[in-house]
Image (cartoon, helix red, strand yellow):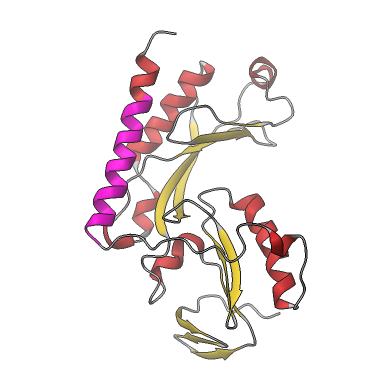
């Protein structure tokens, strides 16, 4: 297999990919661009790119993992609606991420959207809230997730074009399953994997702008507000 880095795909058709450096032909074309799907011609409304950001602390004291129950590098989240997630790394840092960055008009994806200081600070405060520490932050970054209109990931193959995606941040496990699932229809096989409910599923397309920008960002702000109100209620 040859990987051509730095080659921009401009359009996909059955059996053909048009790039900025020429045309590639293949029996099967797979679209698996996740959050970057919106940059492909004709697919701007298929999956909304919504950003998730992360921080990583400097190495923490050795007793931290024992005190908070992360001795085996367990992953963790909590019950808030605006998702957070974290894990202790192999070198005793805390990797911690979450949503909260805005959706950008027209499904725009830009390098500067990867870094939102207010969201990074909110993540740091949440670490303090959860674990009673005020850590130094070593790294921070972000990137776009792909969100289908019904939040349902899907895989499928039709007329020589396959697709996989819409994982809403759960792609580490889901992408592995998607690859194994797509292998069967590409090879003409029926299996237990091809009978899964996400195979062939088609989500509604997102609304045109400005309705898409307004609806997603109102939803994000409302979710954050509800989470804040929950934390203020006495337990």
Classify 38 as above or below 94.
below
- Dominant SS in magenta: helix
Left or right, residue 40 beside residue 183 = left
Q: Which residue is pictured at 50% across the width and 79% down the height?
A: 7
Residue range (magenta) = 209-227
The answer to whether residue 95 shows anywhere in this view is no
Residue 163 horizontal/vertical position (percent): 56, 70
Of residue 47 and residue 97, the one placed in the foreground of this image is: 47
Left or right, residue 41 beside residue 156 = left
Magenta span includes 37: no
Q: Which residue is pictured at 58% across the width and 66% down the height?
A: 200
Residue 24 horizontal/vertical position (percent): 56, 89
Residue 44, quarter of the rendered image: bottom left
Left or right, residue 188 beside residue 163 = right
Classify 124 as above or below 164.
above
Q: Quadrant of the N terminus?
A: bottom right
Mark count: 0
Residue 180 horizontal/vertical position (percent): 73, 63
Left or right, residue 4 beside residue 45 = right
Magenta span includes 214: yes
Of residue 203 and residue 128, the one placed in the foreground of this image is: 203
The answer to whether residue 63 shows anywhere in this view is yes
Residue 74, quarter of the rendered image: top right
Classify 183 as above or below 165.
below
Q: Which residue is pictured at 63% across the width and 18% down the height?
A: 68
Q: Which residue is pictured at 41% across the width and 61% down the height?
A: 204
Q: Residue furthest left?
A: 210
Residue 29 horizontal/vertical position (percent): 59, 80
Q: Quadrant of the C terminus?
A: top left
């Amino acid at each position: 297999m040859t990987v051509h880095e730095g080659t921009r795909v401009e359009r996909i058709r059955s059996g053909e990919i048009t790039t900025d450096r020429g045309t590639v032909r293949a029996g099967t074309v797979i679209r698996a661009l996740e959050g970057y799907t919106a940059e492909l011609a004709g697919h701007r409304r298929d999956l909304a790119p919504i950003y998730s950001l992360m921080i990583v602390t400097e190495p923490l004291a050795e007793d931290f993992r024992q005190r908070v129950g992360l001795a085996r590098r367990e992953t963790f989240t909590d019950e808030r609606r605006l998702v957070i997630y974290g894990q202790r790394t192999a070198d005793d840092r805390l990797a911690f991420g979450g949503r909260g960055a805005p959706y950008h008009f027209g499904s725009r994806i830009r390098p500067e959207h990867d870094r939102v200081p207010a969201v990074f600070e909110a993540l740091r405060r949440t670490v303090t809230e959860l674990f009673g520490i005020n850590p130094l932050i070593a790294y921070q970054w972000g990137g776009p997730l792909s969100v289908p209109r019904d939040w349902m990931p899907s895989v499928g193959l039709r007329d020589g074009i396959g697709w996989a995606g819409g994982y809403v941040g759960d792609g580490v496990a889901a992408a592995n399953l998607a690859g194994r699932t797509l292998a069967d229809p590409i090879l003409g096989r029926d299996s237990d994997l091809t009978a899964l409910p996400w195979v062939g599923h088609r989500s509604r397309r997102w609304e045109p702008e400005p309705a898409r920008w307004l609806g997603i960002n109102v939803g994000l702000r409302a979710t954050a507000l509800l989470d804040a109100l929950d934390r203020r209620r006495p337990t």
